[in-house]
Amino acid sequence: MDETFAFIAPVMPRRAVNPLAVRAGVIAAVFMAVVGALGVYVVEHEQAADAHRVALAAKVAAVEEARVEEAAAGANVPAGMSDELLGAARNAADEAAGYAQGVLAAHGSLIGAGPAFLSTLGSPLLFVDGPSTAPTIVSVATTDTMWAAAVASPGGCAWIMLAADGSIARDSGRECTGEAALAATGSEW
């Protein structure tokens, strides 16, 4: 046979796979999978934390509501004990007012008679700027011209307000904060 005529199929040249492109593709795929998994993890944990926070807030609100109802009704406090606790709350308010009068006499102003200063006097009372929750916890509020204290007792709160002119008002109310006690206008409890 003659070799002048031979059928040769054309062979297409093969493209070589670029190893850098393969690595980049694999790295991108792994990166996207990690980011996706991290996103799912964060979202699930945020939702769980939100649910836990809501449940905790509901539990705290229920406990606080029960505490307020107990205080309002004088629950679990024997009759004689209720009067004793009311007297203790009023005595604590008077004692705190005495300290405030000392500050007024010494400095000519009531602004320095806040809870931070009163706590340094060695009194067995606890002075706070938040609400009073017991007869030994005194909620205090001050302005330039007025000082007030509120002390919790079964069924209410003893308020006392001292003005810069030295006048004292005593009252009672449901809200047991020094801020609320600034509205005291009575002459006795």
Image (spheres, rainbow, N blue to C red):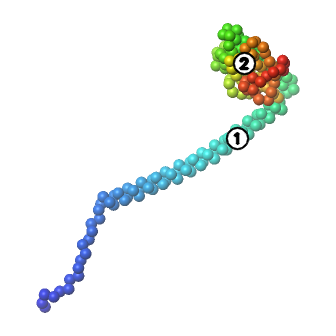
Residue 142 position, x and y percent, is 69, 20
- Numbered label tally: 2
Residue type marked 1: Lys
Q: Observer-nearest residue: 187 or 153? A: 187
Q: Tell me if residue 154 comes above or below residue 96 in the rendering.
A: below
> Image quarter for residue 135?
top right
Q: Nearer the viewer, mark 1 or mark 2?
A: 2
Q: Which residue is at the far bottom?
A: 1
Asked if residue 168 can be seen in this view, the reply is yes
Q: Does residue 132 show up?
A: no
Check disc 2 and report the residue beneath it. Answer: 146
From what the image shows, is residue 78 above or below residue 144?
Answer: below
**Residue 19 x, y percent position in the rendering:** 30, 60
Residues 112 and 47: in front is 112
Instruction: Label 1, secondary structure: give it.
Output: helix
At x 24%, y 72%, the residue is 13
The quarter of the picture where the C terminus appears is top right
**76 lies left or right of 21:** right
Q: Residues within 10 Å of mark 2 (few under 14, many from 20)?
A: some
Q: Relative to 184, does residue 109 appear above or below in the rendering? A: above
Instruction: Specify the amino acid type for callout 2.
Output: Met
Secondary structure under tag 2 reads strand
Residue 68 in percent (x, y) is at: 77, 33
Quadrant assignment for the N terminus: bottom left
- Residue 152 found in image quarter: top right
Q: Which residue corresponds to mark 1?
A: 59
Query: Which residue lies at the image location 67% right of the left edge and 41% below the top edge?
Result: 57
> Residue at the location (60% across, 48% down)?
48
* Residue 119 drawn at (x, y percent): 66, 17
